[in-house]
Amino acid sequence: MYDIEDGRIILNHGSIHEGLIAVASGKGGVGKSTVTVNLATALKERGKRVGIVDADIYGFNVPGILGLKDKPKAKSEEEIYPPDKNGIKVMSMASFVGDQSEAVIWRAPLLQSALKQFMEDVYWGELDYLLFDLPPGAGDMPLNIMQQFSDTSVLLVTTPQETATSVAGRVGQLAEQLDLDVLGLVNNMAYYQCSECGHKDYIFGKNGGRELADQLGIELLGEIPLQSQIRKLSDTGKPVIFEDPDHEISKIYLNIADQIIDNIKEIKV
Ligand SMILES: Nc1ncnc2c1ncn2[C@@H]1O[C@H](COP(=O)(O)OP(=O)(O)OP(=O)(O)O)[C@@H](O)[C@H]1O
């Protein structure tokens, strides 16, 4: 699908200078797509060139969260131009599956061929990071993608709830068994903070994220509160960092992006 030369990933139509990042979660609905889009936006804000592959066949949420309406432009099957929003290029499985209501079982076989086409036929140009929004869980699909992209680093997303951390832990172990670099953990919906009195309520439990990070021996990169504003901005396609760079959650994402920029391993030749 690609070559590696001088610490860069060389594609047919572009190259990736700093790394592939697979964003993975255990349970669905923990905010993996929201984290993917906001992290991409934070990296962009730091001056990086960013693309996203929306590979979550259970729900293609990336274009919606980013507010991307344009479709890829294909001059032929081998010449596809990705649409972009706020400077972030996106290829989504949504373009391959016309009808969102189509049974997921029909989508799984499409995933492998779609990913190959995304890497070989898409004119990504020069990117610093290409992020993959993986299907949730520790099943065959995320495993196959992690195997296929043996140069990717992995970012784990969970909520503190035991049902979420236990599966996220299995995904982290799989990544380590595959010898992938695990960048760290984002603990989403870590707490709810009352906007009136400031009281923090740990709705999904208090220490789940920290305990999982310790158990896997990885960094806890950031804890993002549960906030209705985040849900509203995501639903209306407005990543919080573009809307309000000084928002406390924007600062958390920018801090996560800085840690990733500093710590991601060089692409091995
Ligand atoms: N910190 C947060 N505060 C409030 N709402 C959030 C937060 N993070 C995510 N959400 C909301 O939770 C819902 C699920 O988020 P998202 O689609 O990102 O999850 P996901 O893990 O990608 O789900 P799936 O794997 O099932 O596609 C969305 O409505 C999103 O707006």
Image: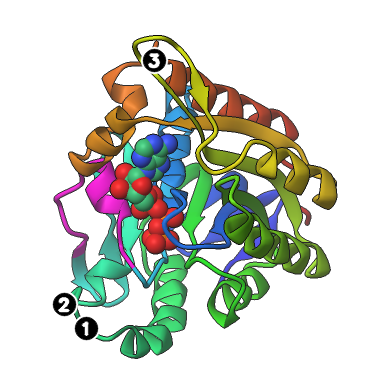
Q: Where residue 172 sits: x, y (%)?
A: 72, 59
Label 1 with label 2: CB-CB less than 8 Å: yes
> In the image, is residue 117 part of the stretch drawn in magenta?
no
Q: Tag 2: residue type?
A: Asp
Q: Which residue is under mark 1?
A: 102
Main secondary structure of the magenta stretch: loop
Label for residue 247? Answer: 3
Q: Which residues are magenta?
A: 59-73
Q: Where residue 116 sits: x, y (%)?
A: 46, 76
Q: CA distance from mark 3 to mark 1?
A: 38 Å
Q: Answer yes or no: is residue 249 visible.
A: yes
Position of 249 with respect to 155 (left or right) is: left
Under circle 2, the secondary element is loop
Residue 114 to residue 220: above or below: below
Q: CA distance from mark 1 to mark 2?
A: 5 Å
Q: Which residue is under mark 2?
A: 99
Q: Quadrant of residue 264?
A: top right
Q: Please tell me whether mark 2 or mark 3 is closer to you in this view.
A: 3
Q: Tag 1: residue type?
A: Glu
